[in-house]
Amino acid sequence: MRCIVRFVSMVFMLFASFSLLAQATSSSAFTKYDHLVLKGIDYIYNLDFDEADAIFTEIVAKDPKSPVGHFFKGMVLWWKMMLDLDDTRYDETFSDYMEKVVELCDERLEVNDRDIEAMFFKSGALGFRGRLRANRGQWLKAALDGKDALPIVHRLQKINKGNIDVLFGLGIYDYYAEAIPEQYPAVKPLALMFPKGDKKRGIARLDSCMRFGHYAKTEAIYFLTQIYYVYEKDFNKAAELAKLLHQRYPDNPFFYTYLGRCYAASGFWKEAEEIFTDVWKKYQQGVKHYNERHVREAHYYIGMAMMNRRDFKDALAHFTHAVNLSLKVDSKEPSAFRVLSELRIGMIYDAQGDRAKAVAHYKNVLNLKEHQDSHKKAKLYLQHPYSG
C-alpha cells in the first residue's frame, strides 16, 4: 500500500514540478525581473543564500503582489533543506512562502483565469510543497498537492505551447511514469490510470531543455544526472553531467559530492578519491556548507578507494569514521553508508585474519536495514571468510 500511495504522489508531483526555474517562463509580467531572477537563481545554486535572498527581497519590495519574489525566497530555503534533508528548521517558513504564492496567484486568477504567471507559480508552489511533504513521508498530503496542481499544468500545456522550458516538466513525467512502475511492479495496475510514460522521449525532452532552455537548464542537467546514475546505470554519462554542474557552481557541495559518486560508480577511483579527500579537507577547514553528512560520505568513498588497492589499515580508519558519523547524523534509520561501512569493516578484519571481529560486524549488518544486498553478502562471509 505504501508504494502505491507513494506512486500516486510522485506522479502528481511530476506533473506539478516544472522546476524552480521553469515556473515563470514566457510571462510578460515576469520578464521585467528577468535579469534579477537569473542572477538570483545562480546565487541559489552556488549556495550564496544571503545574496540570493537579498535579490528576491528586493523583488518583493518592488512588487509585493507578484508571486515571483515570494516563490524564490522559498527556493532559497529549499536549497538549505537540500543540504540536509533531515533538518526540519525551515519547513514551516518554506510552507508559509508557498501558501503565500498560492494566495497571490488565486487573487490574480479570479481577475484573469488565463494569467500564465499565476498558473505557473501556483502549480510550482503546490508541486514543491508536495515534494517537501513527500520528503517528510506525508504521502497522501503530497498526492493532494499534486492533484490540485494537475489541472493547472494541463491547462498551461495548452496555453503555453512551444516553450522549451516546459519540456522539463513533460520530460520528467515521461521518464518516471515508465521508470517507477518498472522499479515497483506492484504499482503497474495503478499506472494504467495515468498517461503512458516514455523513458526515451523523456530523456530527449530533458536533453533539449538542457541544451536550449532558458530558465530550466540547470534543473534539466541535475535530473538527467540522477536518471543516468540511479536508473540507467550509465555512470560515465552521469559523471559528464555532474561535472557540468560542478564547473558551473563550484561552491555547491551537493553537486561536488555527486560528481565524486559518479566517478566511483564509473570505476575512476583516483578521481573519486581526489574529490572526496578535498571534501574532507574543506570540512576540516570550515568551508561553508560542508557538513557532517558530506564528510561521512567522503570517508566512505576514500575507504573504498583504499580498500581497492588493499590499503586495509587506512581504509579501516575511514570506514570507522563513516560509521561513527552515521551514528550521529542518521536520524530515522541506519543509512546505506552506515550499513555498507559495517560490512566493509568486517571484510577488512577477515582479510587481516581477525575472524572474531569480522563475524561481529557481519552480525551487526544483519541487524540493520538491508542496502545493496548487504544481508546476502554478510551471510556469505559468515559462511566463507572474505579473503581480500
Image: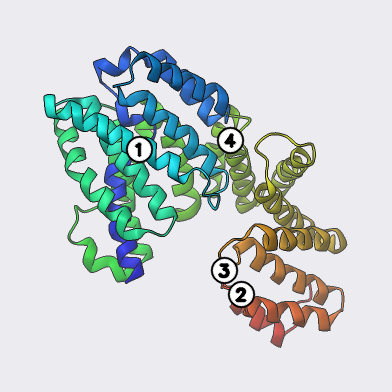
**Residue hosting label 2:** 368
**Residue hosting label 1:** 98
Q: What residue type is labelled 3?
A: His
In terms of sequence position, does the residue under pointer 1 or pointer 2 come before the other?
1
Residue 79 vs residue 297, the one in the foreground: 79
Q: What residue type is labelled 4?
A: Lys
Quadrant housing the N terminus: bottom left
Residue 150 seen in the current view: yes
Q: What residue type is labelled 1?
A: Met
Residue count near mark 1 (Cα–Cα under 10 Å), binned few <14, some 14–19, many ≥20: many
Residue 40 vs residue 247, the one in the foreground: 40
Q: Element type at marker 3?
A: loop
Are dots 3 and 1 in contact, CB under 8 Å?
no
Q: Element type at marker 2?
A: loop
The quarter holding residue 287 reads top right
**Residue hosting label 3:** 371
Residue occupying image coordinates x 44% and y 48%: 227
Q: What is the distance, in whole Å, between disc 2 and disc 4 at their CAs?
A: 34 Å
**Residue hosting label 4:** 243
Residue 162: image location, x then y, percent: 21, 26
Residue occupying image coordinates x 87% and y 63%: 313
Does 346 appear above or below 211? below
Residue 216 seen in the current view: no
Residue 28 vs residue 91, the one in the foreground: 91
Residue count near mark 3 (Cα–Cα under 10 Å), binned few <14, some 14–19, many ≥20: some
